Image: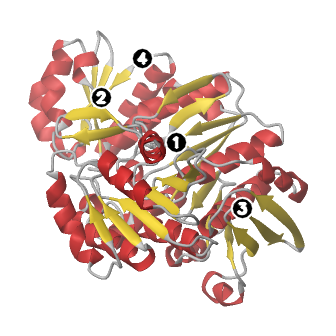
Amino acid sequence: MFLFSGSPSEKKAGVMEFETLLKKAEKGMLVRTDSRKVQEGECFIAMPGTHVRGIDFIPSALNNGAKYIVAPEAARDLVAPIVEKRAVAVYHENPAVALGELARAYFKLVDRDLKLVGITGTNGKTTTTYIIEHLLASAGLKVGVLGTVNYRWPGFQMDAPLTTPDCWMIHELIYNMKKADVDVAVMEVSSHALDQYRVAGLDFDAGVLTNVTQDHLDYHGDMETYFAAKSRLFNHYPRESKTNILNYNDPYGRRILAASERGIGYGIGKTGIVRHEVGDKPMVQGRILSLTGQGMKIETAYKGKSWEIDSPLIGAFNAMNLLAAQAVGLELGLTCKDMRKLKDFQGVPGRLERVANDAGLDIFVDYAHTPDALENVQRSLKNLDFTRLITVFGCGGDRDKTKRPLMGQSVARYADVAVLTSDNPRSEIPESIMDDIRPGLAKSPRTLEHPDRQTAITMAVAQMQPGDALLIAGKGHEDYQILKDETIHFSDKEAALKAIGERTA
């Protein structure tokens, strides 16, 4: 996908220059976005940035021996005098897109055999990728995953610093999956990654939308801009046979489904009213038959067939994740009989994860850090057979402040006891974050507070009575806390077990 502006002759010249770069990349020329790493004869891409400009690092790249410079077309007048005769300057409307095309050429992903599934949405991405991985692996396929917890495939695993890594790294990871004979790669695709074109150069065989609710408005500004970023997975990365798999219970999902030529809806409940909005699209329709603290049974119907599955997962939102995973499996050729394997899927680290303990306490750790996610997980626990719900929560620092009172409101609606504490305060003062949350807790039946997260969890465990459920929300699988410039080890599971030990001592 070439993007060049200017006169017809300038466009033609730009395309020819870029095609030359693509051939160089195919033959092994490395492409860098960090000027400090550039070596003799390599290409430097002056990436756009929110805080710094890539063009400011062109002199450094040239000094390190860059032979080619890819720069924004809009900065031609600034860049040309800097580059002069020291290197070949190639101007592109969007250097981030150029990086994707060059990475695609370097790693020869045009010829890849593996299928690529991208999953976006505010909540549920990680759980859905895990379920898909289990479903496909149980059917004998070799699966790779790029997600919030880690990047992995059989024989390889590394911790994930970002939900969606940078563009070059994505291509490199998929290339290594290809070498390892992976059949299907499943990746979480964040709104930031889509907005910043980190998945440029990729062709997705299927795209999945879990839902769209408030998050990251500090970055995107408003919900419509946030939704537009999510939509790019379905509108900007076409493959001729690509299928969009969309939550028909979500109004944003219905908008994309209505516009998709190859779209499949999934959700809970009848589809008659939905079809007035989206047209006659195939639907993976679910019905919850039972839902307890020990698991669920759901019925799934698709194209005239129906089947039942048992799952140890709890919560209605997990029924949606199970339906999304089934829709992907069906699109990739699995049958309804293959869905029986979902009974063996035990869950995801930090996603409504039960903290096993000898005290018989029902304690769950969950990654919920948005109002909607917190609403869903609390509602699910509240609807089960527990006597009371105690919720420990906070909000991350240096992030969307508008959601803080909304998080408090969510807890006030469902928790019998709210325990307000810190999450990852980062550069902010924990007590200030708590001040922002507190107005939302005005209607809470009972509220306890402490800025130290371990102390707050210990207070919550001490409050537990037989039949209670304790939810520790916000950090999930994370094993650290960021306090100003310091990152310390902190695990909610470990904190809960320590608190149980003190309770029973």
- Whichever of callouts 2 and 1 sits on the residue coming sooner in the sequence is 2
Quadrant the C terminus occupies: top left
**Residue, x 33% and y 67% (percent of image)?**
225
Label 4: state its secondary structure.
loop
Q: Pointer 2 and pointer 1: residues touching (CB < 8 Å)?
A: no
Amino acid bearing label 2: Thr
Q: CA distance from mark 4 to mark 2?
A: 13 Å
Q: Pointer 2 and pointer 3: residues touching (CB < 8 Å)?
A: no
**Residue, x 63% and y 70% (percent of image)?**
316
Q: Is residue 479 left or right of residue 53?
A: right
The crowding category of the residue bearing disc 3, from other C-alpha atoms within 10 Å (few below 14, some 14 to 19, many at least 20), is some
The crowding category of the residue bearing disc 1, from other C-alpha atoms within 10 Å (few below 14, some 14 to 19, many at least 20), is many
Amino acid bearing label 4: Met
In the picture of the structure, the residue carrying the numbered disc 1 is: 147
Amino acid bearing label 1: Gly
Label 2: state its secondary structure.
loop
Q: CA distance from mark 1 to mark 3?
A: 25 Å
The crowding category of the residue bearing disc 4, from other C-alpha atoms within 10 Å (few below 14, some 14 to 19, many at least 20), is some
In the picture of the structure, the residue carrying the numbered disc 4 is: 29
In the picture of the structure, the residue carrying the numbered disc 3 is: 295
Q: Is residue 163 left or right of residue 118?
A: left
- Whichever of callouts 1 and 3 sits on the residue coming sooner in the sequence is 1
Q: Pointer 3 and pointer 4: residues touching (CB < 8 Å)?
A: no
In the picture of the structure, the residue carrying the numbered disc 2 is: 33
Q: In the image, which is nearer the foreground, mark 4 or mark 2? A: 2
Q: Nearer the viewer, residue 225 or 377?
A: 377
